[in-house]
Amino acid sequence: MRTLTKDTVNKIGESVTLLGWVHVRRDHGKLIFIDLRDRWGIVQVVFSPARKELLASANQLRSEWVVEIRGTVKKRPKNMENPVLATGLIEVEADGLNILNESKTPPFALDTDGYEIGEENRLHYRYLDLRRERLKNDLVVRDKVIAYMRDFLHKNNFIEIETPILTKSTPEGARDYVVPSRIYPGKFYALPQSPQQYKQLLMVAGIERYFQIARCFRDEDTRGDRQPEFTQLDIEMSFTDREEILAMTEKLYLSLVRTLFPDKRLTLEADGRIPVMTYKEAMEKYGTDKPDVRKDKNDKDELAFLFVVDFPAFEWKETERRWDATHHPFTKPRVENVEMFWKEFKERPGEMLADQYDFVLNGYEIGGGSIRIHDPELLKAVFEALGNAPEAVERQFGHMLEAFRYGVPPHGGIAPGIDRLVMILQNEPNIREVIAFPKTGDGRDLMMDAPSEIDKKQLKELHITIEAKPL
């Protein structure tokens, strides 16, 4: 039976079988030492000259070879302990070696933090890059954060529900990634920018408290800290208001930090609450809607959460010569009915406020949400006010309007990003460091060589013709 490296400290005098990678090999006269690495740590293994054939086999070993080692756990000789390692008081005296797989020499060092290596090279060999301790730890922490979120929400009567990845293309702010349908020529699915419509439809369905660790896809212009696909904690609640949603979010995140990151220092109000600031106050005082309110901005272990509220409902798009929703068109403007909406929109569209709120941490927007429109006539009016013809509204959002006519409760939610949160908690320079297989800043997967061309047979099956790009 296999023994994990972390468990060897409790097996002094026992025979063990270890499986893992050769991290480092050292020759000390007639002795050969290797550091054997698995996911849980490193343990020193010693091959002695008393076993000549075994020593000869060990002499072949190189870094990153995959091996099975049998041996006996012993205390290290006095003054030979390694206090840096969790297993530094023991070593394994080998009595058996099985080489499971050899390895080419890695293209870069794996025993450093990796920051000194060009990112494109690291991403090309991401499966090797992930072997380094720093990145492995980032993924372990990410898992703990998600597990904590799930446990907290389950204890607060939320249900985790998966929503479709293949959905309908509708205008929600960013460009969609589209997927052609082979069965229905000329028609397309879209990958979800977020589960926005589905989670609202779950409120219509009477679920009342939903969450999901959701994958989201947005075909946006390239930027260094932006990914074509990302992960968010998606939350929706029925019969709620802004104060309840922010209070629940506050309780989740403060308890998460205090439990998983006790060494972090929280900057809070005198009463222990996360500060709340209006959009107007933030812009006037800081010139940004995501201010960094840390007391010491050079202190990476200081966490300053902030809620920003009272956003403008609409913003003017000069290039398109029209008003657009600041958040998304499902966000509720601060009006009581359709008549009040049309009156205010015609008189002062830029001054209308929305029940929208953002969640900020150390100068980064880590989430956003809103109270949603639950009146189908008001929702239709907002779409039309944003320049959509009535027939286009019905074609693109008729399913939502129809559903809302069957007794939809007042509802709202929030969707904090997981990638950016873990990046900040781990003091990483960008979100790519905390994603197992990220894209580059310009949207390429260097390891898989994507996006890539597909063959003519696939194109024909999908009824797609590729036009040559103009020179």
Image: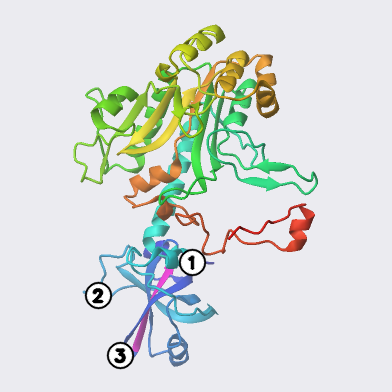
Q: What segment carries the magenta color? A: 31-37
Q: Which mark is residue 35?
A: none
Residue matched to label 1: 124
- Among the 4 quarters of the image, the one containing residue 200: top right
Identify the residue at horizontal 34%, vertical 45% (top origin): 424
Can you say which quadrant of the picture contains the N terminus? bottom right
* Residue 339 spot, x, y in % from top left: 55, 7
- The residue positioned 46% from the left and 14% from the top of the image is 334
The label number, if any, that marks residue 29 in the structure image: 3
In primary-sequence order, the first of circles 2 and 1 is 2
Residue 54 position within the rendered picture, expressed as x and y whole percent measured from the top left: 46, 87
As drawn, is 295 to the left or to the right of 110? left
Write down the quadrant of residue 39 in the picture: bottom left
Circle 3: is it few (<14), some (14-19), or many (20+) Cα within 10 Å? few
Question: Percent x, y for residue 224?
Answer: 40, 52
**From where the camera sits, is residue 233 visible?**
yes
Label 2 SS: loop
Q: Is residue 199 left or right of residue 316?
A: right
Residue 189 in magenta stretch: no
